[in-house]
Amino acid sequence: MLESSVQDQCQAECHSQSDKVDNQNDEAIKNVDEKLTENELFRLPDDRGNMLNVLEAAEKGRLNLLKQFYQIDPQLINIQDSDGYSPLHRACYNNRIDVVKWLIKHGANIRAKTSDGWEPLHTASQWGHCSIVRILLAMGADINSKTNGGNTPFHLAATRGLKNRLLIENLLFRTDIDLDIRNDASDTPYDILKRCSMLYKLWNLL
């Protein structure tokens, strides 16, 4: 999931612990805007008895648990780990559509950036999660936003070639997409796609 890998691709005791959890809550949510390691985040039990933090709950699609975190403090849905990944990033990575919808409805920042400059849209795009990409774009995500390495969501979608065919086809014909953006390696999405698959021939349909 790191920016440095992009160019090489063609390439996560219920009641008996309540007092302990409450004590951890105060310290954890006090600095909710800071980027924390996952060991610094307090945990709650899910319906399977697993102790998860808010990032893990989003990643694993535990919506009921996310609602509990939200009741403790609404700001927790925008907390970021030490690499800058938020619950929304984690849900986008694992294609948790219901979680993504709920997080956005309850104030998750769709423009949150990781330390590599990835927004949730970049994460969903690299892994070809079309439904989530549509949701994020409908809510105002920028299709031309760039990571620290200059990659747009389309650059990242292109790195996986045929695995992302449906998303690539959908993005290619959007009127608001800039197909000429070059990343820091001076590649356009077309350049990346030409190295990865035959889908570059879709450009002939434009």
Image (cartoon, rainbow, N blue to C red):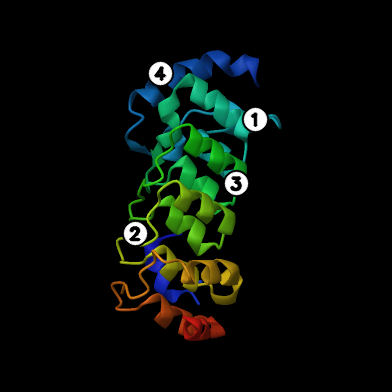
Residue 46, labelled with which disc? 1
Residue that carries the numbered disc 3 in the rendered image:
97
Question: CA–CA distance between discs 4 and 1?
Answer: 20 Å
Name the image quarter holding residue 63: top right
* Spot occupied by residue 123 in the image (x, y as percentages of width and height): 47, 56
Question: CA–CA distance between discs 2 and 3?
Answer: 22 Å
Q: In the rendered image of this protein, does residue 143 appear above or below residue 162? A: above
* Spot occupied by residue 75 in the image (x, y as percentages of width and height): 40, 28
First-in-chain label (4 vs 1): 4
* Element carrying mark 3: helix
* Spot occupied by residue 43 in the image (x, y as percentages of width and height): 53, 29
First-in-chain label (3 vs 4): 4
Residue at the image position 44 percent from the left and 25 percent from the top? 74
Position of residue 186 in the picture relative to residue 102 (left or right): left
The answer to the question of whether label 2 and label 3 lie on touching residues, with beta carbons closer than 8 A, is no
Residue that carries the numbered disc 4 in the rendered image:
26
* Element carrying mark 4: helix
Residue at the image position 56 percent from the left and 24 percent from the top? 68
First-in-chain label (1 vs 2): 1
Question: CA–CA distance between discs 2 and 4?
Answer: 36 Å
| Neighbourhood count class around disc 1 (C-alpha, 10 Å): few under 14, some 14–19, many 20 upward | some
First-in-chain label (2 vs 4): 4
Residue 174 showing in the rendered view: yes
Q: Amino acid at mark 4?
A: Asp
Residue at the image position 52 percent from the left and 49 percent from the top? 135
* Spot occupied by residue 28 in the image (x, y as percentages of width and height): 40, 26
The answer to the question of whether label 3 and label 4 lie on touching residues, with beta carbons closer than 8 A, is no
